[in-house]
Amino acid sequence: MTTDRPLRADARRNRAKVLDAAETVFASHGTGASTEEIAQAAGVGIGTVFRHFPTKEALLAAVFVSRLDRLAAQLRAAAEEPDPGAAFREQIALAVDSSPSKNAIADALAAAGVELDAVKAGVGTAVRDALDLLLRRAQSAGAVRPDLDVPTVMALLIGASHGVEAAGDDPDRRARVISVLLDGMSAR
């Protein structure tokens, strides 16, 4: 049941605890982790989990959106850094390195028949806008190739995210994938 009333403070705290716990549990145990594990990690009852997220797919979608919200905020903050080239490199590396867990959530949602475009509708635009701002600042500073645009960077991120997944648990290989990506985007 959805209402337009804002959540009470304790309900907001519980929802945030469940979301934080879900992200941690999904990252460490995979998307097959049970809602009971998440409730235990959050320190709440299973009823609290289902009160906020009536299905596991709703919880996965909320974690996915929360991650994208956080990414948009990080990109906006990075665009204000004094060295936009270094900020761009750092944000791209973080996005690629964290992509396997994000991809696992996206894959689980898709397998459950959830339309990802609908889930990320509003927040996807915020991520693209923030990335565009950071990209333009890094290009103006001469740190990033001038021929790159956001759709191209997004395509490169998708490819690199699959590259780090293929690298598995080898940190050196993962670092090389990210390094090659960043080198390719650097201004020549």
Image: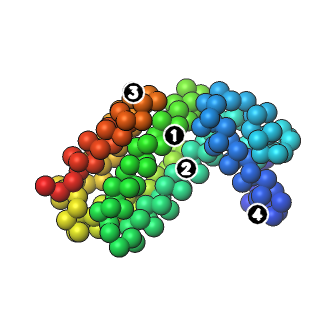
* Disc 1 target residue: 102
Residue 146 placement (x, y as % from top left)? 18, 59
* Secondary structure of residue under mark 1: helix
> Separation of disc 1 and disc 3 at Cα?
15 Å
Residue 83 placement (x, y as % from top left)? 32, 69
* Disc 4 target residue: 6
* Disc 3 target residue: 166
* Disc 2 target residue: 67
Q: Disc 1 marks which amino acid?
A: Lys
Q: Looking at the picture, tell me which residue is in the foreground, 40 or 158.
A: 40
Q: Is residue 11 left or right of residue 126?
A: right
How crowded is the residue under tag 3: few (<14 C-alpha within 10 Å), some, or many (20+)? some
The answer to the question of whether label 4 and label 1 lie on touching residues, with beta carbons closer than 8 A, is: no
> Separation of disc 1 and disc 2 at Cα?
8 Å
* Secondary structure of residue under mark 3: helix
Q: Is residue 162 above or below residue 49?
A: above
The answer to the question of whether label 1 and label 2 lie on touching residues, with beta carbons closer than 8 A, is: yes
Q: Looking at the picture, tell me which residue is in the foreground, 160 or 51.
A: 160
Q: Is residue 121 left or right of residue 37?
A: left
Marks 4, 1: nearer the viewer: 1
> Separation of disc 4 and disc 1 at Cα?
28 Å
